[in-house]
Amino acid sequence: MKRTHCLLPLLLAPLVAPLIMANAPAPTTITVDVVGLRNTTGLVYLCMSASPALFPEGCDKDPNRRIAKAKASEAGTLVIRDVMPGRYAIVLLHDENSNNKMDKRLFLPKEGFGFSRDAPVKMSAPKFDAAAFEVTGAPLRMKMKVRYL
């Protein structure tokens, strides 16, 4: 009799698995239209994070971050694929000299930047909550404006 109990889960697994998989959230795609580039030199990076503690300055240190990049001359639209449902924020960098970092002059950015939801920049970069958006499973399209100081 004990042997039957051990086999029961194995026999039921093929019947239950499709039901579980049907309710599992599916990954989706986020398409970002980049507007306001002042030139077509360098690269454009998007870094998407679900971590309020690492946004925006530490986005590149987030082990779960999602990144999209392209040459600025081809960066009209960037796509982040295979995004699971959740709450995220995106920071954008127009790295005009392609040195993989935000260049600054007296603590102020020399290169272009932007944030999801066009989060306002006041005395510092916006907090995660100001830039955060929800991904539900349906494809999402947004516009991100590049700012220069």
Image (spheres, helix red, strand yellow):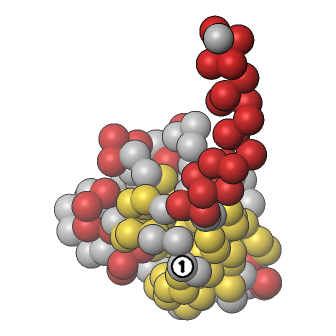
Q: Quadrant of the C terminus?
A: bottom left
In the image, taking residue 45 as reference, residue 114 lies left or right, namely left
For image coordinates 43% across by 59% down, the residue present is 86
For badge 1, the amino acid type reads: Ala
Residue linked to disc 1: 138
Badge 1 element: loop
In the image, taking residue 59 as reference, residue 97 lies left or right, namely right
Residue 60 appears in the rendering? no
Q: Nearer the viewer, residue 80 or 20?
A: 20
Residue 137: where, in percent of width, then height? Answer: 52, 71
Residue 87: where, in percent of width, then height? Answer: 39, 60
Residue 127: where, in percent of width, then height? Answer: 27, 57
Q: Quadrant of the rendered structure where residue 148 is?
A: bottom left
Q: Is residue 116 above or below residue 53?
A: below
Q: Nearer the viewer, residue 63 or 138?
A: 138
Residue 108: where, in percent of width, then height? Answer: 38, 60
